[in-house]
Image (cartoon, rainbow, N blue to C red):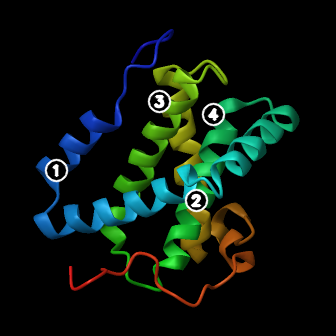
């Protein structure tokens, strides 16, 4: 990993996952990833997402921590939106792909400097936050609150297949 550059790409990580996951899991991964990208980059939410990220950076200067927490929150939202349809085995890969895309975007937009080490540190924060949200035993071991309890439960399943797919 580079100390000065961001060399990790969403495309290279996706290829690694394609080599390890079944075709069905890859289809589910694409569905979940697309839902996350639609949320982050839709005209209705993109500006709010960037503004919130920049506000978070002002109050918490640890950029990797902010990235990790924000992507974890996005994944918790997607999990809740899926209404139980998101397979557990794609949660990690989806979160990592979303993190890679977030780092690519932030780096190219010159919002903050991003390196491979920033990515790695953000993934650690994200994994810890997702573990705390999804695993009661993990929360008990580290004494963390359950962030998923405060997340609203939407009525539709955002990640469910559309049109017989």
Looking at the rendered structure, the secondary structure element under dot 3 is: helix
Q: Separation of disc 1 and disc 2 at Cα? A: 22 Å
Judge depth for marks 1 and 4 and give the one in front: 1
Q: Are marks 3 and 2 in contact (CB under 8 Å)?
A: no
In the foreground, 120 or 29: 29
Q: Separation of disc 4 and disc 3 at Cα? A: 13 Å
Q: Quadrant of residue 57?
A: top right
**Is tag 4's residue or tag 2's residue first in the polypeptide sequence?**
4
Check disc 4: other Cα within 10 Å, few if <14, some if 14-19, many if 20+: many
Q: Which residue is mark 4?
A: 64
Q: Residue furthest right?
A: 59
Check disc 2: other Cα within 10 Å, few if <14, some if 14-19, many if 20+: some
**Is tag 1's residue or tag 2's residue first in the polypeptide sequence?**
1
Is 53 situated left or right of 11 in this image? Answer: right
- Residue 123 location (% of width, % of height): 51, 42
Residue 104 marker? 3
Check disc 1: other Cα within 10 Å, few if <14, some if 14-19, many if 20+: some
Give the residue drawn at x 42%, y 13%.
2
Looking at the rendered structure, the secondary structure element under dot 2 is: helix
Q: Quadrant of the C terminus?
A: bottom left
**Is tag 1's residue or tag 4's residue first in the polypeptide sequence?**
1
Q: Which residue is mark 1?
A: 18
Q: Are marks 1 and 3 in contact (CB under 8 Å)?
A: no
- Residue 103 location (% of width, % of height): 51, 32
């Amino acid at each position: 990993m580079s100390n000065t550059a961001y060399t990790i790409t969403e495309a290279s990580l996706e290829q690694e996952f394609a080599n390890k996951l079944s075709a069905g899991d890859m289809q589910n991964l694409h569905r979940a990833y697309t839902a996350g990208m639609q949320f982050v980059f839709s005209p209705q939410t993109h500006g709010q997402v960037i503004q919130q990220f920049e506000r978070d950076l002002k109050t918490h200067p640890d950029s990797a921590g902010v990235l990790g927490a924000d992507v974890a929150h996005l994944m918790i939202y997607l999990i809740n939106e899926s209404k139980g349809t998101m397979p557990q085995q794609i949660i990690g890969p989806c979160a990592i792909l979303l993190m890679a895309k977030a780092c690519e975007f932030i780096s190219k937009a010159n919002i903050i400097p991003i390196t491979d080490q920033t990515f790695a540190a953000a993934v650690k924060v994200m994994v810890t936050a997702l573990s705390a949200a999804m695993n009661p035993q993990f929360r008990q071991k580290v004494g963390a609150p359950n962030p998923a309890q405060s997340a609203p439960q939407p009525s539709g399943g955002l990640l469910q297949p559309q049109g017989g797919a």
